[in-house]
Amino acid sequence: MTKTSSMGKHATSRWLKLSLLATALTASLSANAATLSGNVALTSDYLFRGISQTDEGPAIQGGFTLAGESGFYLSTWGSNIKFGEGSMELDVLVGWTGALNEEWSIDVGAMEYMYPEGDNGETEFNFYEGYAKFFYDKWTLGLAYSPDYFGAGVDDYYYLSADYKYPLVESMALDLHFGYNAFEDAAEFETFLAAGPTTDDSYIDWSVGLSGEILGAGVAVKYADTSVDDSAECYLCDSRIVLTVSKSF
């Protein structure tokens, strides 16, 4: 995100509801068999839906997931950022994942994006969204919706995505990604970008990359770009190569 804000008047209420749900889920997971896993990563540029969140600089990221046998889970994830007054993004996810049939599985839930110190009555960076991902063979199809997206003056937002992972050789795969970002109108999209002018009310983000494992660590490199028009002068939306090294535990 590169703009001036999100979340709106009902931010506190929404966060309270998500907190209560997360607390209830944590209690439920603690009472039953649950596993705790984590991950940490170093990336040359933190891209969120094709747009740099670190002013084209590196990021250290990581998170934890508490998952139960029933498929319910609670996750947290964080990264450094470089926009607004804050320097950190902290996300909380509550969801469920499981099989729909022999071929399809699903991951569905709600997610809160928080920007400590960066969010206030003027910026309203914080926002939440509902999401669903469908898994079939090597495909992942995703849908996300937020009624009050990142930035003051930005309301309805939809995100449709498709990812395809094709194994090439042992421990290496080709990764293809396509994302469609839709805003309520061109004015809200321009507000989101904090740039302009633009007459579009949507943009595409896409990437092509390779991922694999080296010495027990995950390594990925990708070429990423967006369809944001040159007239918007959004240098954070330009094409770039991103290298990421990660480790799960």
Image (tube, helix red, strand yellow):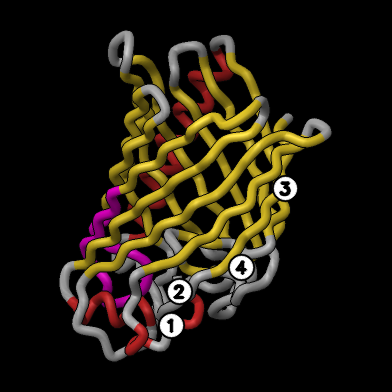
Q: Which residue does the numbered mark 2 point to in the structure image?
A: 237
Magenta stretch: give its range.
146-160
Q: Residues within 10 Å of mark 1 (few under 14, many from 20)?
A: some
The residue drawn where x is 63% and y is 28% is 169
Q: CA distance from mark 3 to mark 4?
A: 18 Å
Mark 4 residue type: Ile
Out of 241 and 90, give the one closest to the viewer. 241
**Would you say 40 lies left or right of 45 here?**
right
Residue designated by label 1: 234
Instruction: Give residue 63's quadrant in the image.
Output: top right
Tell me which amino acid carries mark 2.
Answer: Cys
Mark 3 or 4, nearer chain start? 4
Q: Is residue 10 above or below residue 151?
A: above
230 relative to 213, above or below: below
- Amino acid of disc 1: Cys
Q: Residue furthest right?
A: 215
Viewer-nearest of discs 2 and 4? 2
Whether residues under marks 1 and 2 lie with C-beta atoms below 8 angstroms apart, the answer is yes
Cα distance in 3D space between marks 1 and 2: 5 Å
Gap between marks 3 and 1 measured at Cα: 27 Å
Q: Which residue is mark 4?
A: 81
Question: Which mark, residue 245?
Answer: 3
Q: Secondary structure at mark 1?
A: loop
